[in-house]
Image (cartoon, rainbow, N blue to C red):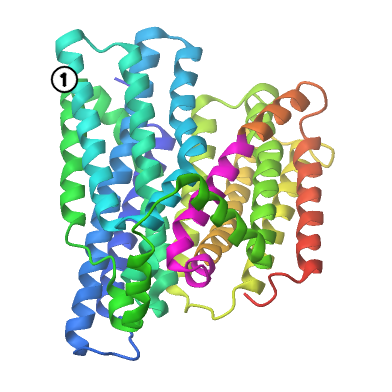
Amino acid sequence: MKGISLEDIIKIKVLIFGIFYLFREMISLTSSLGFTELSLNERELKGAVSKNIVLLSLGLLVSLFGASIFRFATSLYILSETGSGLSFSLTLVMGTLPGVLFGPISGVIADRVNRKYMVVIMDIISGLIVLGLLVLSIVDDLKLIYIYVTTFLLSTASVFFNTPMTASLPNMVDDENLTRVNSLTSMISSVASIAGPFLGGIIYAIIEFRVFLLITGVSFILSGVSEIFIDFELNNRYFKKDEEEDIQESVKVEMNILGDIKEGFSYMVSQKWLMSIGVFVIFLNLFIMMGLYVPVPYIVREVWGFSAEQYGLLNTMFPVGMLLGSLILAILPQAKKVYKILISSLFAYSVLIIVIGVITSEKLFILTNNQYLSILIVLYVLIAISAMFADIPFNVVMQKLIPDDKRGRITGTLRTLTLAFTPVGAIIGGILVDSISPWILPIACGLMMCVLLLTLIKSGSIKDI
């Protein structure tokens, strides 16, 4: 019998660490909430917010864990049944395409209908989709086409779940705890990213695939039921004027998909800070894909000859860093202005990518694979922490400054633009890796990110956020 690998041991330790601090942070948030301008009994209000945090955390845990485990287990199933890289890659396409196609539409709907109903219905639909695959596998065997369609539908439901959920976060808690709640959701996502593949591999090995589908489908439905009890308008009802809620409800009567998308774009253009960051994020993701996600795996696998275990361990460090970054932000007091944090973390991100390029060039020194692995592990963790120090404060700023009736559209549109340009970066990076020395890409893209950041600073458009 094959023993437990170093990668598995590290994943287990990180998973235990992540779950421990996740629940500790949930307890911390629900036991030490600070409120101002209370309009109801303080104990009653704290109880309502505590209930929201617990139910939100549990719902996200089930949804994200279920989705992560499903993706990994179905990937293993396809590879074991077909042995085809093309068949495997098609599942990745089916999982990514809905985000590009339906991002803006999900934002329009999230701004025009009750977001709570949308979140609950999407989780229940996700469960029914998985159970539908189970029924098909019993009636007509588990064919690849069924898995592809299920993956596409499940990813579509995820898009229509994530947009209203993200847009609703500032309405579920008070402003003082918004950063900590965003950090908590990022921690849950990170733990799911680490645990999903690990648990998916175990489940695939010990549980019959149809039983796994049954458990996953029921879990999604139970998650949807639990979200019924979340108060999606807590902050609006307790801290905002009643008239604002009436205005918001009145504009949700009529829906014009194209007109609403156009209105969302018009709002983005009218807000200089939002437009500047939006354009910056699009190009940032393009350069990150070209400078990090494409060349580094090529170098470590094809040039240095990292083993599958070494490569897997390295990839684990991204969610580990994301978890650490989210935890640090959850512990730190919420900053009133995020400009300095945002700029500093993005600059650190850019410099770290340049450092990776310098190390992988082997111009300064030549080390053993284990020594290179140790250095890259540290750099990957620092990059992921930097990403969280930029991502979470940016999300908080968006949630605070964008009006509630437009928040869904802006969130969905930015996510779509980011996803749409990611494959472009992958294609360009893949072409360049075959044409030039791959270590040039991290250095060049890191420098371009620095230039892009200096341009953003010079514009002065985000200095006041």
Establish if 101 lies above or below 374.
above
The residue shown at (35%, 70%) is 171
Tell me, yes or no, whether the highlighted magenta stretch contains residue 401: yes
Disc 1 target residue: 135
User: Residue 136's x, y, as percent?
Assistant: 20, 16
Query: Residue 286: percent from the left, percent from the top?
Result: 68, 41
Magenta-drawn segment: 396-422
191 vs 416, left or right, is left
Along the line of sight, which residue is nearer the eye, 146 or 76?
146
Q: Is residue 187 magenta?
A: no
Q: Is residue 201 visible?
A: yes
**Label 1: how many residues lie within 10 Å, few (<14), some (14-19) or many (20+)?**
some
Q: Which x, y percent locates residue 211? A: 15, 25
302 and 66: which one is in front? 66
Q: Amino acid at mark 1?
A: Val
| Horizontal side of residue 193 vs 375, given as left or right | left
From the viewer's side, name the closer residue of 294 and 157: 157
Image quadrant where one finds the N terminus: top left
Residue 14 can be seen in this image:
no
- 126 vs 1: above or below: below
The residue depicted at 83 percent of the width and 42 percent of the height is: 364
Magenta-drawn stretch, dominant element (helix, strand or loop): helix
Pick the residue in front: 407 or 182: 407
Element type at mark 1: helix
- Rendered-image quadrant of the C terminus: bottom right
In the displayed structure image, the side of residue 374 where residue 164 appears, left or right: left
Where does the image place residue 17, in percent across and percent down from the top left? 35, 55
The residue at the point 66 percent across, 78 percent down is 464
